[in-house]
Image (cartoon, rainbow, N blue to C red):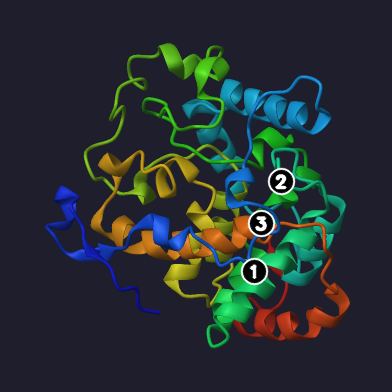
């Protein structure tokens, strides 16, 4: 897949052509969206709206408890991959019992979103079968919610810990007041514990399904390309890929990968609707992709 674009102005890129205008990638065709594009990701506060209150409370807990110590603890705990064993398809089916409490756009089982995302990617990128599979499995890390993790440690937008909170983080104002890192001089400056352009792979992200799914795929020696792994690892990092915060931590690789994340994002976001795909009819095709790229019993 080749993206034409503009010469990058980030100092780390030295003027190379490495990304395109995000507004071009995030402007879907009319057929993508079930409602006006500006109505997606509505995080306005309405105490009388049960869905919005659920979303707000999920993020409040996330921003209260996701700190450097918490993230390091979860990485150590989940990197053992000793929680359970299953095939990828069995894990996908499990998402039929999960509704994402952080999502303001839909209130349906996550398996529906998985097939919606995958099928739109398949329609727009028919020759990239690995991309279809990436769309299907991108949220499977949410399976942690069935093994003891509260949803605030599983779902929602991700963000770095160990440095200052960016203004573009959802509910940024006051939601971090009870987070201990907010007042820790080691962690509350622009760079915090990081060096300029160290690369996102060296940054501690808030713990959730993105990083966990990435780690599961690497641990089980999946055959997906690097672009797929990168999209899965950072698809929820909205403060970066959409709001363009945290560029000061990004490496040349991050800027070169960003178009893939943005291309994936428009399918992840704008395919959300209440129309249900026929999962049973679609499963044989996606099972064939699983057999090719992520076969057998996986350690989770």
**Quarter of the image where one finds residue 2:** bottom left
Q: Distance between the residues labelled 3 and 2?
A: 16 Å
- Residue 130: image location, x then y, percent: 56, 79
Residue 126 drawn above or below residue 173: below
For label 3, the residue is 139
Quick check: can you spot residue 230?
no
The mark found on residue 233 in the picture is: none
**Quarter of the image where one finds residue 77:** top right
Q: Please report whichever mark, 3 or 2, sits nearer to the chain's N-terminal start.
A: 2
74 on left or right of 111: left
For label 2, the residue is 105
Dot 2 falls on a residue whose secondary structure is: loop
Q: Residue at 39%, 14% (x, y): give it.
A: 184
Q: Which of the pair 275/62 is nearer the observer?
A: 275
Q: Residue at 85%, 82% (x, y): give it.
A: 281
257 on left or right of 78: left
250 on left or right of 131: left
Q: Please report whichever mark, 3 or 1, sits nearer to the chain's N-terminal start.
A: 1
Q: Which of the pair 229/171 is nearer the observer?
A: 171
Which one is in front in this view, the residue at disc 1 or the one at disc 2?
1
The mark found on residue 31 in the picture is: 1
Residue 174 drawn above or below residue 234: above
Dot 1 falls on a residue whose secondary structure is: loop
Q: Tell me the quadrant of the picture where the C terminus can be found.
A: bottom right
Q: Residues within 10 Å of mark 2 (few under 14, many from 20)?
A: some
- Residue 78: image location, x then y, percent: 62, 46
Which one is in front in this view, the residue at disc 3 or the one at disc 1?
1
């Amino acid at each position: 897949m080749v993206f034409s674009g503009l010469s990058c102005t980030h100092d780390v890129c030295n003027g190379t052509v490495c990304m395109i205008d995000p507004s071009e990638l995030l402007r879907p065709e009319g057929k993508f969206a079930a409602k006006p594009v500006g109505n997606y990701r509505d995080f306005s506060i309405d105490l009388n709206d049960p869905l919005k209150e659920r979303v707000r409370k999920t993020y409040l807990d996330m921003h209260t408890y996701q700190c450097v110590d918490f993230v390091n603890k979860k990485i150590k705990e989940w990197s053992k991959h000793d929680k359970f064993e299953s095939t990828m398809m069995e894990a996908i089916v499990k998402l039929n019992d999960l509704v994402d409490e952080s999502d303001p756009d839909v209130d349906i089982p996550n398996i529906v979103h998985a097939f919606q995302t995958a099928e739109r990617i398949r329609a727009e990128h028919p020759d990239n079968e690995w991309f279809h599979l990436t769309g299907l499995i991108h949220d499977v890390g949410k399976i942690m919610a069935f093994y003891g993790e509260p949803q605030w440690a599983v779902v929602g937008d991700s963000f770095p810990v160990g440095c200052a909170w960016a203004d573009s983080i959802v509910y940024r104002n006051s939601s971090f007041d009870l987070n201990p890192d907010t007042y820790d001089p080691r962690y509350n400056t622009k760079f915090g514990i990081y060096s300029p352009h160290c690369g996102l792979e060296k940054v501690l992200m808030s713990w959730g399904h993105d990083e966990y799914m990435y780690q599961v795929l690497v641990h089980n020696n999946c055959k997906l390309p690097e672009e797929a792994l990168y999209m899965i690892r950072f698809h929820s990092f909205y403060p970066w890929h959409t709001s363009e915060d945290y560029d000061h931590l990004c490496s040349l690789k991050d800027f070169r990968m960003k178009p893939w994340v943005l291309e994936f994002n428009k399918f992840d976001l704008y395919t959300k609707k209440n129309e249900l795909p026929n999962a049973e009819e679609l499963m044989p095709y996606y099972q064939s992709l699983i057999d090719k790229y992520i076969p057998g019993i996986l350690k989770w």
